[in-house]
Image (cartoon, coloured by chain):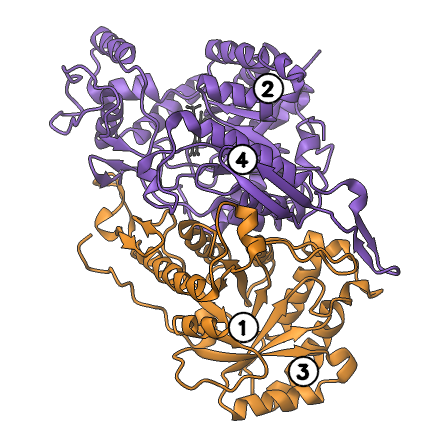
Chain colours: A orange, B purple
Amino acid sequence: MIVGLEIDGAGTDPAAWRGAEVDPRAILTGELALRAVQRAEAAGIDFVTFVDALEAPDDVPDRVSVRLDALGLAARIAPLTERIGLLPTITVTHTEPFHVQASVATLDHVSGGRGGWVADVSSSAAAAAVIGRREPAPAADTWREARYVVDVSRRLWDSWEDDAIIRDASTGRYVDRERLHYVTFTSPTFSIKGPSIVPRPPQGHPVTAVRVNTPEALEAAADAELVLLPDSSDLPTQLNALVLVSVDARPHLDGVDRLVERIEGLAAAGADGVHLRPASLELDVPVIADELLPRLRERGLVGAADRGGSLRGRLGLGRPANRYAGSER
Amino acid sequence: MTKQIHLAAHFPGVNNTTVWSDPQAGSQIDFSSFRYLAETAERGTFDFFFLAEGLRLREVKGKIHDLDVVGRPESLTVLSALAAVTTHLGLAATVNSTFNEPYELAKRLSTLDHLSGGRAAWNVVTSWDAFTGENFRRGGYLDKADRYVRAQESLRIVRKLWNSWSEDQLVLDQAAGAFAREGAGAFADEGAHFDIRGRFGLPPSPQGRPVIIQAGDSEQGREFAASDADVIFSRHGTFEAGKTFYKDVKSRLSKYGRSEDSLKIMPAVTVVVADTDDEAIDKAAHIREQQVSGPTALVLAELLWGRDLSAYDPDGPLPAEDPVVGSSVTQGRVGYNDPFPIVAEWRAQAEAHGWSLRQTVINQQNRQTFIGSPATVAEAINHHVQEDAADGFVLVPHLTPSGLDDFVDRVVPLLRERGVFRDEYAGTTLRSNLGLQV
Ligand SMILES: Cc1cc2nc3c(=O)[nH]c(=O)nc-3n(C[C@H](O)[C@H](O)[C@H](O)COP(=O)(O)O)c2cc1C
């Protein structure tokens, strides 16, 4: 089983930030997230996701109403971790696709091949209003566009062949431009010439995840390498992706038995893994790390804690061939 | 009064200044290179580390330019990672205001500021051209005249978002269950380019708001800097040009109710240090040879002439034709508004010295700013600053990532001895180290 962990403020419980063990300032400095990710890494958890949206969290005075940009937070954590995958949520509805792909590629570079992203959309009026002069689009439209963004991102990651940088002193050429490719991509809502400004990421393609929280998102999951399903759902069989189920986890209150049972159930049902959503990062992640993971390991459900290598390697995904390799520009 | 010098480290860029063919030249992409140079700069108690940006690969005669470094990672993501491995060094990202939305810029930059404990800076650049626009939904529709209208409006809105929380709105009272006051971060703005409203999800960072850098050189660019910037990154590194620029920009400040020390002028400069002045002169000449190969000399001449010069021999004489203004032979880099006097000067110098095209480019274009022994360089840098040709410098090394080692190890101690550069960081934020008000 693949095990992922969700980072969301002080935890998914809206009151988690109030606990005596929490320094609420550490939400803004990133320290709270960093500590959780380091604990998760030491326990052998495969990857973390970072919750985000374009718009700010709701203005509810007794909740964590601030949120760091997930990509920045993931990058801040990258040099202080070694093995765990880092997947910030990135919304693509209003952001330039060219920037999205460049920053995900960069996360892969700064993490030494542990980068990925949870591709998400913004269909709310609040998200449209912070950009302005745009109407919120229906979910089906935003997800259709998101599929184009995923597609063009992968093309742009391929727009540099792995060996494009040649540093050939004899001819004075730094790159072989025959190994750089225009993507000349056109979708109904945008077009991009390319190539990317960032050389091909270490993993070739950083891992693309989609969280299926609406029926429209399920369609886009067809393009993902990692699909995060809500807890209640039946497991779709037709997906050509790793299928993980998101499970709320409160082991500091409930103990780990129920979680072990649930995860065994998911394994039996054919899920590829579990995506744990801890109620409190400070209280639940230590229990997940110290008790849950060892129990899963005893049962042979998860691998050794100290596995290194790229995130794709860890998830059993191959390194994708470059679609342009050997082709004319 | 003796002025204190400000210093910044520029990660080697995609101009021919960066020598990639030297055996010592490391990766332009690996995070280890960024980390090495940032750690060197922090060891030297520099004010900040600087990353440039280009949103489309450069082209010459319709083909991707392949003679210089090509490709780099995205700035804000690299700097967020560097925030983890540095503690005092400022982290400056060049980010374009045409192809980004102010809300997103405000959020990403404020995140970097929080994650670094108040060390973020934004170098606001304004490329607007259709060539770059082909990589964006937005396209290259902006008129040249409009680039600063949008930049200025973007910056005004970004600042508004950074100021959208008042100090007492972040409560963090765990017992009472009050995280923030209701209404914190609410904003609305309407202008020529934007019409936005909502809530900004980040309170001010320890430095209040990120530092603003500006690198435009036109009349509009200078006014923009005088009204809005904390630092100018200029190209006027020589003494006389530096003094003229310094006086020009500083004299514009009073009109905006600003004091002269509220805007720091930091030209981009290159430095060559060796044991003696003579050795440094030889070393500098060798570096220039590395920077300007025959093919590179032709490309640089094409940028100036605005013509295809591939029929010329770089080891032969200068082209006989007149330059063309506004040509698109070279795409993705700033051309010359008035090439004629420069071409005339090149011709005169080539004739006087019997230089080939390549020798002319090497001698006319790539001369390093400060060349000499550590004492000579320290003296010259201090002289420029005390005589108001600059408030400090952005050092552009020619080697990645070790190009500032000599400067930090040999020149910085002399500046410290003279009492014109800090021994250690006085403040924890970039704004305080630059001596800027919050
Ligand atoms: C020293 C210096 C460095 C610059 N670096 C960049 C850069 O990295 N990326 C970029 O897009 N523009 C860069 N520029 C361009 C300017 O910031 C500016 O946007 C452009 O020159 C147009 O403005 P202007 O007409 O006022 O000069 C640089 C300019 C100067 C003087």
Residue A140 location (% of width, % of height):
44, 67
Residue B55 location (% of width, % of height):
39, 41
The reply to whether residue B372 is in sight is no
The residue that label 3 is drawn on is A292
Residue sitting at 71 percent across and 72 percent down? A279
Amino acid type indicated by mark 3: Leu
Label 3 neighbourhood size at 10 Å, few (<14), some (14-19), many (20+)?
some
> Does the CB distance between marks 3 and 1 fall below 8 Å?
no
Residue sitting at 71 percent across and 37 percent down? B208
Q: Nearer the viewer, mark 3 or mark 1?
A: 1
The residue that label 2 is drawn on is B391
Q: Nearer the viewer, mark 4 or mark 2?
A: 4
> Does the CB distance between marks 4 and 2 fall below 8 Å?
no
Does the closest atom of ligand 1 sit within 8 Å of the Cβ of label 1? no
The residue that label 4 is drawn on is B154
Label whose residue precedes the other's in the sequence (3 or 1): 1
Q: CA distance from mark 4 to mark 2?
A: 27 Å
Q: Nearer the viewer, residue B83 or B193?
A: B193
Q: Nearer the viewer, residue B233 or B156?
A: B156
* Res B293 label: none
Q: Please indicate whether residue B114 sits to the left or right of residue B195 in the image.
A: right
The residue that label 1 is drawn on is A213
Q: CA distance from mark 3 to mark 4?
A: 48 Å
**Same chain, labels 4 and 2:** yes
**Same chain, labels 3 and 2:** no
For this orientation, the residue located farthest to the right is B175
